[in-house]
Image: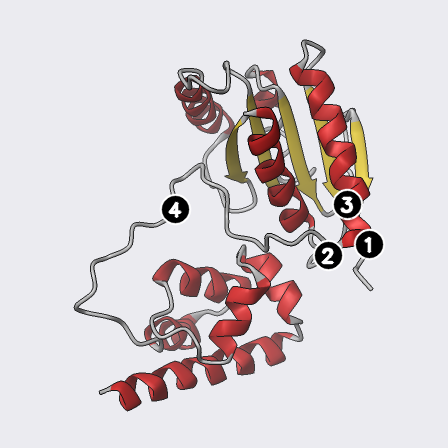
Amino acid sequence: MRSALLSDSLGFAQLLRTHRDKARLTQEELAERARLSVRTLRDLERGRTRYPHRTSVRRLAAALELTGEDRVTFEAAPPRSFGAPAVAPPPEWGLPSVSGTVALSRLPLLREIEEVVSVASGGGEPALVTVTGPAGVGKTTLAVQCAHVLRQRMALDVLFLDLGRDRRGPGELRTAVRQARIARMTSPTSGGRCLLLVDDADGTRHADRLPPLLTLGFTAVVVTAREPLAGLVPSRHLVLARLR
């Protein structure tokens, strides 16, 4: 039985590598698109993960832009544990999993974000930080790493919104975010302070959905996007280049 599971795991690993090669993506680029850590992706490609999480598999299929039979085959390929209890997917507003190690060259950027948010949490105007750069450069990873640091050092609550995949209209989305924000205001440790991390924004597709979220009383809003967002005046704008 164990050898069969190992064979299934290696089969999915080979399928994953094949699709990634066809898409001409590096591990870092695919991990960024799928909202997974690079370590998680490497373990999947090496067959080290016996039971890949269904959510991770679906994210990979979407990131690889698989459709039709290719997608069905891909999502059905990983072995599943029928005896183990089901694992609940991450909460809607929870931060995705990323590497806990911050690249040395990006520590100054992380400190810049922390400085801007620190001023805002002290009673200044709400901070707006935009992080831009091409796909796969590590925007989401840096923003999430920063959110973890801010939550720990400044006792901020954090809401994560994957705007690129969210399909709600402007009014429905604003209501949902507002309700989540109100729920966080009852936290005994944050004092009502909350950071909103908006991932994968697009100035054209999201022109009517992003601005309403900036008026909901967040201490700070961090937005990742491939291009600068027209109409927004950030407190700080960071541009990421590929790591060398």
What residue is shown with label 4?
Answer: 90
Q: Quadrant of residue 199?
A: top right
In the image, is residue 87 above or below residue 209? below
Give, as a three-letter code, the residue at label 1.
Ala
Residue shown at 62% from the left, 40% from the top: 205
Q: Position of residue 37 (x, y in %)?
A: 56, 59
Q: Earlier in the sequence, mark 3 or mark 4?
A: 4
Residue shown at 50% from the left, 14% from the top: 191
The Cα–Cα distance between marks 3 and 4, rounded to whole angstroms, is 27 Å
Q: Secondary structure at mark 1?
A: loop
The numbered disc on residue 137 is: 2
Residue shown at 50% from the left, 42% from the top: 95
Q: Secondary structure at mark 4?
A: loop
- Contact (Cβ within 8 Å) of mark 2 with mark 4: no
Locate the C terminus and report the quarter of the image it occupies: bottom right
Q: Earlier in the sequence, mark 3 or mark 2?
A: 3
What residue is shown with label 3?
Answer: 107
**Viewer-proximal residue, 203 or 186?**
186
In the image, is residue 121 above or below residue 108? above
